[in-house]
């Protein structure tokens, strides 16, 4: 093990040293997330007695699903060694396009609510995924750095979303859309949570049980080794950015249903939040490492911190400070863990 | 070119010596009672396998590592080297494998890095003085390198020269070179040797680490062989045959390292006709049959690796034809070649062989993920994957513990076993091993040779691309030699000899029809 985490404890008794070694080993194994989760839960349950109430926890789940979906997509980009800064824009475009289509269909034929919803969702996902296609082509085929492509697309998409709506929220959606996908429930489980559970299951299977999942990890871990093993890195990168946008798009639809209007400002901070969720969950920024279960936990953690700060009356400005700080701490922890995992790199 | 000691009648002064020098790390005796001596004007080669203690020894002599026991003497006086800076001040300077140059700065700026001259009156950089000082240093050494060019614009050899120049600023009596030719072309190597010769003539003592026996013969005066942290022998270069050196280094006879591979040439599986490729192969024609080991020898950059990479779909074939198992496979994709039974083991396992954070078992099956391991609807056949990984690990003698560890944590030898195991998860027709034993200890090396033997004798076609001459000499049944992108010859036994190989290395003669 590296000398970095081994301060000289010879003048202490053995117990703290053993405990420290145990913690270091746990940290290398599971990453920084469990530690942060425990700290957050302890702090917030001490600060607010509502925090651990059933109502608050279900509330937290319901708020966290949007970030969970986006973070899983973000994980795909991170796992291949890139990242996607344009997820927020995908949310916005999906929201604006789906809302516009729905409201115009419902205006033309007021009885066809479900047709309007289907058309709106289809158009929204298509529009959002299109951003993913451009990202994927830019990264995989043209070979531009993910930073530049997705940063550019972030601006392009946001601009288009504002242009389409003139900056005004799109209203006039069929009410059943919100009733069902925003607040409805099936078998007593809220629909957004249900959709998310399906997506999480699908992603878990994809990453752990399919060939493409292994390809994603291999391309991120060592692209040249993957190429020499007959794996088409272009195809894999394209799939990563495409799926990332699709998941963000689904999240955008659910969020639109929740707020009841098509908004260009949805997802302003979600790129930062999703990257933070992933990195806290042990997804390596160097690529090649990441587990769906952990990312879900990471997103829940971010949601939990936001929820806890709301309960304890921490203002939204300070929340931004905390969120950025968490991201940086997570990256530092990732760095440290990498050094412990692959010595003398 | 032969560089021999600067002959003089008076016995040369002893610049640097060690007495019973030892270094102990937790669990490892890295150096054990080493007595070593360096004379003025001498090139003293340290020879040994990875982990033999060469690096530890030079690290101690350069002041970077402190010995656990023993003494160091400089010109007969006991000395203590507390740091690299201290060693430098005492005239000992080392050039390690990793360059310490800043590529975005100029040569002059690099040469004065950390000791930049300033104006006397104001604390600003004196650029004129800086250039002047750097230029003087280069002139003294006879390097024709432009002081103002960026280091990133220089060739590898020129960078090496700058690195050496940097290490020679100030007063230097002992220069330590750690595998300085590892990435140099032949011409660059020759100019480096000329420099070594000039320094020798000025009375500088040089400690030189190299694995290349030819190179050692060319410039060494004496050779000290280390094994497992102990000094095995110090021999004069004249008395050191290649076989003796290898035996000293490994502690076993050559016959025990290199197996006798039976050759039963059968059907031709690979035919290459007049191939030109974008990565620099010119007009190469080769063929490989089942049941034989074919060598492709040549210097770094001779096109030997490039040829097989073009066949494997890693570079475009611009002219010519490739037939694999009777099918036209010119410009086939890597995936296609793999599926056809063409196995390629790349030379650099860290850069392009292994996904270092994968477990060995996951790494091994990478090439067959899209093949046998792909179930319906892209499902991964995990049971089969585990089973194949286990059986391949058994064949290459990788322990179960190492099978489930991250590859990045394994030793070089075990990593190379994982690389070989990739070839056993699926039986291939043609195995191409590009530098199969680079950076691998002798024990693992002979195990890997055993695997190659088994493959060939079971009827597979084997190609060994190698810069390691003994490997070519002792293992291959037939050897092509490449030089500057072209085939310079084909050798059959009993004509696969060192001298013939070396001749073909340097002259692109036409193939004798």
Image (spheres, coloured by chain):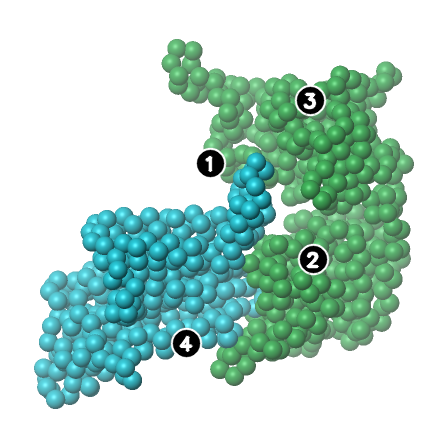
Q: Which of pointers 3 and 2 indicates the residue nearer the eye? A: 3
How packed is label 1: few (under 14 Cα within 10 Å), some, or many (20 or more)? Answer: few
Residue A190 against residue A92 in the figure, above or below: below
Q: Chain of mark 1?
A: B
Separation of residues labelled 3 and 2 (CA atoms): 38 Å
Q: Which residue is mark 2?
A: B414
Q: Are marks 4 and 2 in contact (CB under 8 Å)?
A: no
Indicate the chain on which mark 3 is placed.
Answer: B
Asked if the residue at tag 1 contacts the one at tag 4, i.e. Cβ–Cβ closer than 8 Å, the answer is no
Residue drawn at the location 17% of the way across and 66% of the way down: A263
Q: Disc number at residue B104? A: 1
| Label 1 and label 2 in one chain | yes
Question: Which sits in the foreground, B239 or A55?
Answer: A55
Query: Could you tell me residue B62's position as x and y percent?
Result: 66, 29
Disc ID at residue A202 = 4
Do the residues at pointers 4 and 2 share their chain? Answer: no
Quarter location, residue A310:
bottom left
Please check whether the numbered discs 3 and 1 fall on a single chain: yes
Q: Chain A: what color? A: cyan
Disc 3 from disc 1: Cα separation? 36 Å
User: Closer to the camera, B96 or A258?
Assistant: A258
B249, B308: nearer the viewer: B249
Q: Please tell me the numbered disc located at residue B80.
A: 3
Measure the C-alpha gap from mark 4 to mark 1. 47 Å
User: SS at mark 2?
Assistant: helix
Q: Position of residue B329 (x, y in %)?
A: 62, 73
Instruction: Name the residue rendered at 67%, 21% in the picture.
Output: B91
Give the residue drawn at x 80%, y 57%. Answer: B446
């Amino acid at each position: 093990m590296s000398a970095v985490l081994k301060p000289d404890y010879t003048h202490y008794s053995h117990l703290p040293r053993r405990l420290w070694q145990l913690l270091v080993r746990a940290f290398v194994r599971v990453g920084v997330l469990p530690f942060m989760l425990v700290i957050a839960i302890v702090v917030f349950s001490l600060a607010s007695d509502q925090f651990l109430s059933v109502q608050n926890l279900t509330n937290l789940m319901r708020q966290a699903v949007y970030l969970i979906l986006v973070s899983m997509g973000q994980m795909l980009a991170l796992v291949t060694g890139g990242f996607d800064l344009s997820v927020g824009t995908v949310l916005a475009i999906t929201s604006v396009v789906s809302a516009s289509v729905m409201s115009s269909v419902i205006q033309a034929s007021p009885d066809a609510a479900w047709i309007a919803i289907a058309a709106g969702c289809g158009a929204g996902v298509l529009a959002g995924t299109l951003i993913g296609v451009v990202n994927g082509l830019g990264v995989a085929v043209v070979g531009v750095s993910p930073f530049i492509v997705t940063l550019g697309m972030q601006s392009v998409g946001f601009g288009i979303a504002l242009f389409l709506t003139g900056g005004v929220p799109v209203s006039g959606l069929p009410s059943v859309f919100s009733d069902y996908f925003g607040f409805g429930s099936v078998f007593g489980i809220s629909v957004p949570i249900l959709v998310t559970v399906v997506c999480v299951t699908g992603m878990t299977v994809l990453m752990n049980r399919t060939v493409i999942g292994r390809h994603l990890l291999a391309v991120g871990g060592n692209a040249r080794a993957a190429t020499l093993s007959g794996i088409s890195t272009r195809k894999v990168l394209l799939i990563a950015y495409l799926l990332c946008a699709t998941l963000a798009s689904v999240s955008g639809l659910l969020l639109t249903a929740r707020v009841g209007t098509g908004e260009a400002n949805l997802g302003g901070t979600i790129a930062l939040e999703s990257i933070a969720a992933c990195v806290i969950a042990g997804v390596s920024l160097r690529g090649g490492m990441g587990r769906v279960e952990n990312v879900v936990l990471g997103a829940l953690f971010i949601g939990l911190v936001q929820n806890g700060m709301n309960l304890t009356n921490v203002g939204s400005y300070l929340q931004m400070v905390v969120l950025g700080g968490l991201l940086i701490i997570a990256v530092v922890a990732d760095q440290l863990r990498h050094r412990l995992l692959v010595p003398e790199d | 070119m032969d560089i021999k000691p600067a002959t003089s009648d008076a016995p040369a002064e002893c610049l640097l010596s060690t007495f019973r020098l030892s270094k102990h790390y937790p669990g490892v005796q890295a150096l054990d009672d080493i007595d070593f001596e360096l004379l003025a004007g001498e090139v003293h080669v340290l020879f040994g396998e990875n982990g033999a203690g060469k690096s530890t020894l030079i690290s101690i002599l350069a002041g970077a590592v402190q010995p656990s026991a023993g003494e160091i003497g400089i010109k007969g006086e006991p000395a203590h080297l507390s740091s690299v800076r201290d060693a430098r001040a005492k005239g000992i300077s080392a050039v390690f494998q990793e360059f310490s140059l800043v590529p975005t700065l100029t040569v002059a700026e690099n040469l004065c890095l950390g000791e930049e001259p300033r104006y006397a009156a104001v604390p600003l950089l004196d650029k004129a003085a800086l250039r002047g000082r750097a230029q003087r240093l280069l002139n003294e050494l006879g390097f024709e390198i432009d002081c103002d060019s960026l280091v990133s614009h220089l060739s590898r050899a020129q960078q090496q020269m700058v690195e050496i120049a940097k290490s020679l600023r100030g007063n230097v009596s002992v220069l330590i070179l750690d595998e300085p030719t590892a990435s140099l072309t032949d011409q660059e190597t020759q100019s480096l040797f000329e420099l070594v010769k000039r320094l020798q003539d000025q009375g500088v003592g040089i400690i030189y680490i190299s694995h290349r026996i030819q190179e050692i013969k060319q410039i060494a005066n004496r050779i000290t062989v280390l094994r497992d942290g102990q000094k095995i022998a110090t021999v004069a270069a004249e008395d050191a045959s290649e076989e003796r050196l290898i035996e000293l280094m490994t502690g076993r006879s050559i016959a025990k390292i290199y197996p006798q591979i039976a050759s039963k040439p059968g059907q031709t599986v690979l035919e290459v006709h007049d191939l030109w490729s974008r990565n620099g192969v010119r007009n190469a024609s080769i063929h490989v049959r089942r049941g034989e080991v074919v060598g492709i020898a040549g210097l770094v950059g001779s096109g030997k690796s490039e040829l097989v990479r073009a066949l494997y779909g890693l570079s475009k074939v611009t002219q010519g034809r490739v037939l694999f198992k009777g099918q036209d496979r010119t410009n086939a994709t890597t995936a296609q070649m793999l599926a056809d039974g063409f196995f390629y083991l790349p030379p650099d396992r860290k850069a392009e062989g292994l996904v270092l954070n994968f477990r060995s078992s996951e790494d091994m099956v990478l090439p067959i993920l899209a093949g046998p391991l792909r179930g319906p609807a892209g499902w991964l056949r995990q049971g089969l994957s585990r089973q194949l990984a286990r059986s391949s690990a058994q064949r290459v003698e990788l322990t179960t513990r190492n099978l489930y560890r991250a590859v990045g944590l394994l030793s070089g030898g075990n990593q190379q076993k994982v690389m070989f195991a990739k070839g056993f998860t699926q039986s291939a027709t043609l195995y191409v091993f590009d530098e199969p034993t680079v950076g691998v200890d002798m024990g693992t090396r002979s195990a890997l040779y055993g695997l190659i033997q088994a493959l060939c004798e079971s009827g597979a076609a084997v190609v060994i691309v190698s810069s390691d001459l003994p490997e070519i000499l002792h293992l291959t049944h037939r050897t092509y030699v490449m030089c500057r992108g072209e085939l310079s010859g084909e050798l059959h036994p009993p004509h696969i000899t060192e001298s013939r190989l070396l001749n073909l290395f340097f002259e692109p003669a036409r193939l004798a029809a």
